[in-house]
Image (cartoon, rainbow, N blue to C red):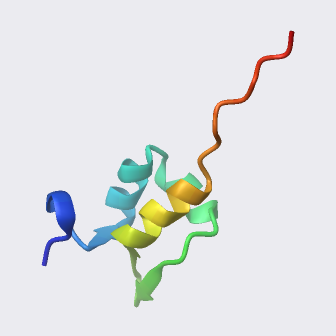
Amino acid sequence: MKADFGMPDILSRREAAAYLGICKTTLDRLDIPRTKIRRRVMYKCEILSKWLDEHTESKRRRRA
């Protein structure tokens, strides 16, 4: 089943790291909700998008 824009609803650890533009080790250290079935770790796309929105900084003003 596919979500909007052709993205799958669930991403593997590798796909989730690529989506966020980080390595898998960094992804493991972040406090992002995930589902684990036996040894397989999966991430919901909507949760990754929401987490990314919540952790995106707006442009900061430069000091004069």
Eyeballing the image, is 59 above or below 57?
Answer: above
Question: x, y (%) of residue 33?
Answer: 54, 77
Eyeballing the image, is 35 above or below 49?
Answer: below
Question: x, y (%) of residue 30?
Answer: 62, 62
Which is nearer the eye, 54 or 27?
A: 54
Viewed as shown, does residue 51 lie left or right of 20?
right
Eyeballing the image, is 23 above or below 30?
Answer: above
Farthest-out residue, right: 64
Which is nearer the eye, 18 or 56?
A: 56
Q: Is residue 7 visible?
A: no
Viewed as shown, does residue 43 lie left or right of 1?
right
Eyeballing the image, is 16 above or below 11?
Answer: above
Q: Residue at x 48, y 48 (%)?
A: 23
Viewed as shown, does residue 7 lie left or right of 62?
left
Q: Is residue 50 visible?
A: yes
Q: Residue at x 85, y 16 (%)?
A: 63
Viewed as shown, does residue 45 lie left or right of 54?
left
Name the image quarter holding residue 44.
Answer: bottom left
Q: Point out the image quarter for the C terminus.
A: top right
Farthest-out residue, top: 64
**How many labels sit on residues?**
0
Q: Residue at x 62, y 54 (%)?
A: 55
Q: Point out the image quarter for the N terminus.
A: bottom left
Question: x, y (%) of residue 60?
Answer: 72, 29
Which is nearer the eye, 17 or 52?
A: 52
Question: x, y (%) of residue 56?
Answer: 59, 47
Q: Residue at x 44, y 43 (%)?
A: 21
